Amino acid sequence: MITSATGPRPADFTDVRATNLAVVLRFVREHAPCSRADIAASTGLNKATVSSLVADLIERGLMRETGLTENRVGRPATMLVLDGSPYAAVGIEINVDYLTAIAVDLSGRRLLTWRRTFAGPAVTSGQAVTAVAALARRVLTRMTKEARRVLGLTVAVPGLVDLTGGVRIAPNLGWTDVDLAGDLGRALRGPDFPILVDNDANLGALAEHRFGSFGDTDNLVYVTGEAGTGAGVIMDGRLRRGGQGFSGEFGHIQIDPCGPTCGCGRPGCLEAVAGIARVSTDKPVFPFSPAEIEPRIDEMARLAAAGDRQALNALVGIGTDLGRGLAILVNLLNPQAVVLGGHYVPLASWLIPAAEAEVRRLVIAPDAGGCRIVASGLGYGAAALGGAARVLDSVDSGRLPGRG
Amino acid sequence: MITSATGPRPADFTDVRATNLAVVLRFVREHAPCSRADIAASTGLNKATVSSLVADLIERGLMRETGLTENRVGRPATMLVLDGSPYAAVGIEINVDYLTAIAVDLSGRRLLTWRRTFAGPAVTSGQAVTAVAALARRVLTRMTKEARRVLGLTVAVPGLVDLTGGVRIAPNLGWTDVDLAGDLGRALRGPDFPILVDNDANLGALAEHRFGSFGDTDNLVYVTGEAGTGAGVIMDGRLRRGGQGFSGEFGHIQIDPCGPTCGCGRPGCLEAVAGIARVSTDKPVFPFSPAEIEPRIDEMARLAAAGDRQALNALVGIGTDLGRGLAILVNLLNPQAVVLGGHYVPLASWLIPAAEAEVRRLVIAPDAGGCRIVASGLGYGAAALGGAARVLDSVDSGRLPGRG
């Protein structure tokens, strides 16, 4: 028996209105400036309903009128755009080697992007909370100065985050069972917005899906290229977290039973064979100082660009190993695109051709099931941006801020 | 930008009625016998709406009244049960070594289960169509005799089936690009019900989700144990097919770069290392005659049950290799259960403990992310039953048969 939780649910008129508010909000996000008549024509909602919904959205400060159309047959219409200027959505990303904070308004416009170095493995989780809280306070102060209300903060963590937001294991940070949302809430003295915690790869996938060049792709995998490697899995247009929230542990699939030992203690994990730690050496190099990662990546890219034979060979080798792992992922999930992020991005022009060849060789579906492997255009802020996107998603799904 | 295809859609009153018809149908499927008042109390629909929906469902022959309650405070109520007796949903499964046909009524009650031997690799796809059409005609004749209208036929194929139902590759049958639905429709002279074609593992997963012991599990993987190995992936309560319909190619993930060559020509595929072909030997044994498979499995189970050391060692080895593949799948998908089907079932008591140990060792999530590995209780008919389930799913999602 399929339980009613998975089946269709009864629709009542409250649901209908919340759904329709969200539909109108998203239509205007994508098609602004547009008129009430445009909304009615495209959504199939009748004009009276659209007018009532738009009035509600204007009252909540989510939408505003912006003058009349020209260049149009018939009576000029009042055009609508998203407003959202009174609001901000914030994401903060914790990495082994840096923190990133990003804030966006409701239309997704970037309000700030701050990145600072961080020595993740050298500090306790308590000290990390203090550092994140300090960064969050600076963001909140800035938003207050701009007269914006923060609707939510999502923190990205490179580790296993359960469905309640608890951090179970973050191997490269040395964390086990950290109540990050609770600790951070206390450090921020109980802010009036929700604090969520999520896996960095999941949030990277959300960011790609909302803001990336594959945003119209319903089946998408985002692969982090940080000190660790993880995947965020979007299937049928939504993030798929699995039974306990631990899906996408791509860095810990075994791709070589005889391979080097991973930071997690298991043999031959993808992260140990084809992770960022392998990029500047042909031996596993953990532990190394977080501060070394970015200079190493830059040096490797410089050498490869200069045609250094050893660097090029190393990158082909790592790309091929990464491709073996990606082929497994593509055989199981059949994504339309795999987006490589973080530190993989500066090396993408050497890694991707090698990875793609391996994917084509090892995926049984013709033409690798239509999957493309591409570098993220979101830079080092993908997970933080995804954190902000998760706040916007909750607005888009109908949890609107109260009337202004 | 998220396109409107993935976002909420406007709800109008036709949608609301179709949704609510489906809600009432499913509620009664799960809770019959029940009264109109029970439906209203549990679904939140008002009583007048429930009465109107029930009248519609009775008129379509999907529900009937069945006398009055007793043992209840207050006025006795008329009880409702699913009827569906005028209808049948049919699934047929093509395997390398057998065909199975299953028909169920709308409440999921089994009407017939027929299994016959089949020499898949020895015949052309045209000859296979003839064999499947002959079996389908017998099923249709039986349903006609029982005065049932067939609502749909789904055919399960062990191969890559695209989103339009085209069979792209079925390696163990030797098929490439077969329009099975079209060919079968012509062989059946254009029946008045839809013919769908789907991957066998996908349909096995649908059957487990609707009829199996893990039916309340929203994150479930079904693994076929036929001549080939495949997986059907259910996440968040629905089958996830990927971008082109080719997800779940578990049999062709590479688990040993130095492993034996698979039937698909690639080295070290799971199917070559831990598939059914490996069960009765420690060497890859393809090609072998389909008729040999079941006797070999039976012999292996007999030897293992009798404590034969060599057989037990072989099963532990295969279970461990299968576990390595399952660990990859569990790291990526975090299912609550992996259900092993087909020929794996008679050997499950030896394979599963070895596989489970390997999954616990290689999955990074604590306690394997809560995943259990279990044998299917659906026997050799899982994919055929899933074919029938897919027909029922289309009814449950609101595509109801016309009024009687």
Image: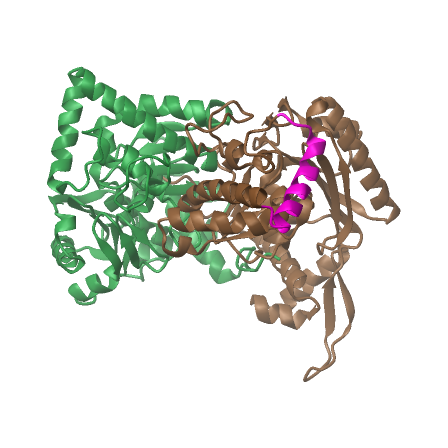
Chain colours: A green, B brown
Q: Check the image and name the residue furthest to the bottom.
A: B73
Count of labels in the image: 0
Using the image, determine if residue A206 lies above or below residue B124. below
Residue A99 seen from this side? yes
Image coordinates of residue A349 in percent, x first then y, are 26, 22
Q: Name which residue lies at 73% across and 67% down.
A: B80
Using the image, determine if residue B185 lies above or below residue A403. above
Magenta-span inclusion, residue B289: yes
Q: Decide whether the magenta segment is chiefly helix, strand or loop.
A: helix
Q: Name which residue lies at 41% across and 48% down.
A: A24
Using the image, determine if residue B348 lies above or below residue B172. below
Image coordinates of residue B214 in percent, x first then y, are 57, 56
Q: Is A199 left or right of B191, judged from the image as shown? A: left
Q: Is B203 left or right of B236, judged from the image as shown? A: right
Residue A73 seen from this side? no
Q: Which residues are magenta?
A: B287-308
Q: Name which residue lies at 49% across and 57% down.
A: A16
Image coordinates of residue A155 in percent, x first then y, are 24, 53
**Quarter of the image that includes the N terminus of chain B:** top left
Magenta-span inclusion, residue A141: no
Q: Quadrant of residue B203 in the image?
A: top right
Q: Quadrant of residue B175 in the image?
A: top right
Q: Is B228 left or right of A298, judged from the image as shown? A: right
Q: Is A359 left or right of A107, judged from the image as shown? A: right
Image coordinates of residue A223 in percent, x first then y, are 32, 37
